[in-house]
Image (spheres, grey):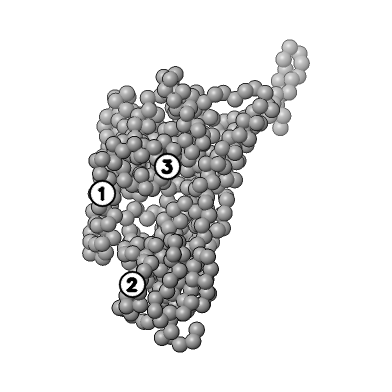
Amino acid sequence: MPVSQSVAGRVVALPVRSSRLNSWIKDRVYSGQAWFGALLALAFVARLYHFTSPPDDAHEWRQTQTLMYAASYGHGAGLLTPYGNWNGMPPKIDVLEFPIYSILVHWLSGLIDLLIAARALSIVFGVAAILVFDRLCAQMGHPRRRTATVLFALAPLTVFYAHATQPESLVLLMMVASAYFAVRGQTSWRWSVAALASIAVAAVIKPTVLIILAPPVLYLAWSRKQWARHLVVLAGAGIAILAWGTFVRGVLLSEDPLWYHVNTDPDWLWGSVSLRYSLDFYVVLAVRLLVAILPPFAALFIVVAVWRRAGDPFWWWMAAGCLASYLVFAKLNAVHFYYQLPMVPALAALAAYGAPRLPKRLAVRFVLVELLAVAVLFGCAGLYNEQPVYSTAGAAIAAVSSRNQPIIVISKFGADPWWPSVLYYADSNGWNLPHGTDSSRIASLPGATPCWLVNVRDEPGAAMVPNGWVVTRLTSDYLIAHNDACGTP
C-alpha cells in the first residue's frame, strides 16, 4: 500500500519501496545504466552460438575428449578415472585433470542430452563468473567497475569458453570466486575456508591458477597483516595439487604409463630455457592479448593505465602471477591458448583504469557500443572457426557400420596415445591409427576383424586406403572403405 506523510499541513505520498529482489538487481547487476545491461545481454547471446552443434571449432579434439569422459561414466568408468576412449579397444583411463566438470555433465545428462548438458553448464559457469567478478571489483572499490565487468564479459576467450565443452569456464568461476573470498577473508575465517575450497578445485583442474593467485593473496596477507589465514589458503591448494597428482600418477603408471609419461614430459610442460628468450614466444602472447584475451585492442588500455600509474596493487600482483604462469608453463601456454583464460580477470580490471569514459551523448554511446560488438565478433571469429570434419566423418561411418564390429579410424591424431573424436561420433568400438597405416598393421590388431574404415582427410594427400579395402564413399573431408574379407557390404 502507498505510504503518506503530513508535511507542513500537506499530505505527501511517499514512493513505494522496491522489493529486495529489484533492489539487488538494480544495485548489483543493472545500476540503472542501459548500456551496461545491453552489453551483458550481448555477452550472454554470444555464448549461445551453436548451442546444439557438436564441437567443430577451436580445440575441437579437447572438447570432444571432455565429452568422452562424461559419456564413459555410463560405460563402467569410475568417477575419478574416466575413459578417454570408452568405446575403444580396450577402454583406456585418460585422467589428468580433476574431472569434476565431466562428472557434473554426466549427472545432468540424466535429464537432458549430454552435449546440451555440457554447453548449459559452461554457460552457467561463464555467466556466474561475470557476476562474481563484478562483485570482486565492487569489493575492491574499483572506480571503473562496470567498464571492467564489460571488458571481462566480452573478452573473446571468456565468450568462447562459456560455450566450449571444456572445464575452462568452471576454472574461471572458481578462480574469481577464490579471489573474492580471499579479499573478504579479512573479516572472517569462513571466507578463508571458502577461498581454500574454491582455489583447490580450480588448481586441481589447472595448476596454473595457483601460480596466478599466489602473488595477490600474498599481497593481501602482507597489506592486512593476516598471514595465517592467507598462507593456509595457498598451502591447502598446494596440498590438493600434490594429492591429486599422486593419485593420477599411481593410476596411470599401472594402467597406461605411456599416456602419463607423454603428458608429464618436462619439455611438454615447461619447454626449453631458450623458449623463454624467443621473440616469437612473446609475439604469440601479444597477439592473443590484442585479439582474444581481452576485447580486440583493449589491451592497449593497460598501457594507458601504466602511464597514469593507475590500478590497485592487488590487480597488478595478479597480473604478475599471470606472467609467472606463462613463463613457468611456457610450452603449454605457447601451444594451448586456453591456459591464458585465467589472465582475463586481472587484465580486464587493469584495462578499465585506462579505458576512456563513455560520452554523455546517447548517439555516440550507441556507436561506440556497436564498434565494441564488431570488435568482439572479430576476436571470436578465429575461435569459432568451424571445421566439422571429425563429427561429419563420425556420423557417416556410424550410418554404415555396426556397433558389434570394430572400425578403423585413420587421421592425423591416430598415433598412440592420442584418441581422436571420430570414435565418439561414430559411437562404435575401434582403433585410431595414423595416416600411412598399411594392411599388415591392421591385420595385427587383436580381436575381431574390422570391416569398416574411415580415413579423415585432415592432412594433404590423406585419401589413401590400405590394400584389401574398397572405397564406398569419398568426399572432400573423408572417405569410407569396406574390407573385402568381410564380404559384400
Label for residue 480?
none
What is the secondary structure assignment of the residue under circle 3? helix
Amino acid type of the residue tagged 2 in the rendering: Pro
> Which residue does the image show at 42% across and 22% down from the upper left?
306
Q: Can residue 441 be seen in this view?
A: yes
Name the residue carrying label 2: 90
Left of 106 or right of it: where is 417?
Answer: left
Q: Do the residues labelled 2 and 3 touch (CB within 8 Å)?
A: no
Residue 329 position in % (x across, y down): 30, 43
Residue 446 position in % (x across, y down): 31, 78
Circle 1 residues within 10 Å: few <14, some 14–19, many ≥20? some
Residue 474 position in % (x across, y down): 52, 71
> Which residue does the image show at 56% across and 58% down from the upper left?
52
Left of 446 or right of it: where is 108?
Answer: right
Amino acid type of the residue tagged 3 in the rendering: Leu
**Mark closer to the chain start, 2 or 3:** 2
Distance CA(mark 2)–CA(mark 3): 34 Å
Name, please, the residue furthest toward the right. Answer: 10
Distance CA(mark 2)–CA(mark 1): 29 Å
> Which residue does the image show at 39% across and 54% down from the upper left?
100
Name the residue carrying label 3: 341
What is the secondary structure assignment of the residue under circle 2? loop
Foreground residue among 191 and 114: 114
Q: Nearer the viewer, mark 2 or mark 1?
A: 1
Name the residue carrying label 1: 267
Foreground residue among 435 and 359: 435
- In the rendered image, the vertical position of residue 233 relative to residue 76, given as above or below: above
Amino acid type of the residue tagged 1 in the rendering: Asp
- In the rendered image, the vertical position of residue 206 relative to residue 117, given as above or below: above
Residue 24 position in % (x across, y down): 57, 34
Left of 223 or right of it: where is 28?
Answer: right
